[in-house]
Amino acid sequence: MSKQMKTLKDIIGKKINEIGGYIIKSGPGRQLVSVVYHSRFFKLTSNRIYEMMDRKLLEEVRKHKLPEHIAIIMDGNRRFADGLGLDHNTGHLLGRDKLDEVVEWCFSEVGIKVLTVYAFSTENFRRDDEEVSAIMNLCAEELEKGVNDPRVHDNKICIRVIGHLKSLPKEVRNAAKLIMNHTKNYDKHFFNLALAYGGRQDILQAIHCIARDVKNNRLKPEDIEEEIISSYLYTKGLPDPNLILRTSGEERLSNFLLWQAAHSDLYFSDVYWPELKKGDILKAIRTYQQRQRSFNN
Ligand code: FPP
């Protein structure tokens, strides 16, 4: 499209928005918009439109090299709940349901090999006891359910819970051990759930283990290279994340995968985690692919 055409399109678009805004702001206009917005017809139509757009985007994404490892900072459960007048624990519940969907999109639809999600940081323990215990119950429930979930076994998903497991409640620790044990031989997909996780703590525990191995003559100090350090981290044996996605408009790493993120592409989405759509994930992957193209050219 030529530059003039693009400018004309922008001007017309702006005018339409202004007129639309004027109609919506008027009393009857507002009522009409509300009736249309809440109608079954509107919902069905917009769902159809989203489906069509997703299908097109998925086709596009599949034509190019996929990121092998996607890591996600799931953020915004409480703000999403606040916006709807719901309590925070309901926000976390909706966040848990979203995770279920995202795992399915990434593994079954897109074909991503490794997915790591930041569910609970070492800093999150500072939240009030009632909220921490509600989140921990959700985590235990989710991990227990996963043990017998046919999707885990049919798709051969190796599940690891990464983080300072000793600081987790017993139920979560036991459920984590169980699912890790049941899925340890799978290698089609890898799913890492970061719980009680901190990037600095990950590096620190690696340093402790390296020091122990040096002391026991299992490792020579002069042999410590980058690959050796990577092999002592919680994500050992897996590639570093190619793409890190964070929801909710915050643009920080918040102590997530600090060592592993050295060369990762970062993508920040304005939507709160529970409202993330398949199209948002696809857009993030497509952006990554386009950035790779310009980076490699
Ligand atoms: C992020 O939003 C959510 C958390 C830090 C807590 C737990 C994550 C989930 C419930 C999703 C995955 C669930 C399971 C069970 C693995 P926030 O609470 O930081 O919200 P805010 O940014 O709006 O305050």
Image (cartoon, grey):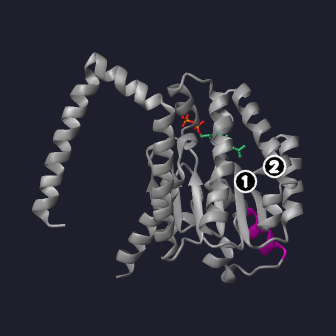
- Can you see residue 163? yes
Determine the image quadrant of residue 215. Answer: bottom right
Instruction: Report, in whole angstroms, how far the alpha carbon at label 2 lies from the one at label 1.
Output: 15 Å
Find residue 220 and report its horizontal and vertical position in percent.
74, 81
At a point 71% along the width and 54% down the height, the residue shown is: 193
Q: Quadrant of ligand 1?
A: top right
Q: Which residues are magenta?
A: 208-216
Q: Which mark is residue 114?
A: none
**Amino acid under label 1?**
Gly
Judged from the image, the secondary structure of the residue bearing numbered disc 2 is helix
> Who's the residue at 39% across and 70% down the image?
290
Q: Quadrant of residue 87?
A: top right
Q: Position of residue 217 (x, y in %)?
A: 82, 79
Measured along the vertical axis of the image, is residue 90 above or below residue 50? above
Q: Position of residue 233 (x, y in %)?
A: 70, 65
Q: Which residue is mark 2?
A: 143
Answer whether residue 215 is magenta in the image. yes
Which is nearer the eye, 245 or 15?
15
Closer-to-camera residue (24/190): 24
Where is the C terminus found, in terms of image quarters? Answer: bottom left
The outermost residue toward the left is 4
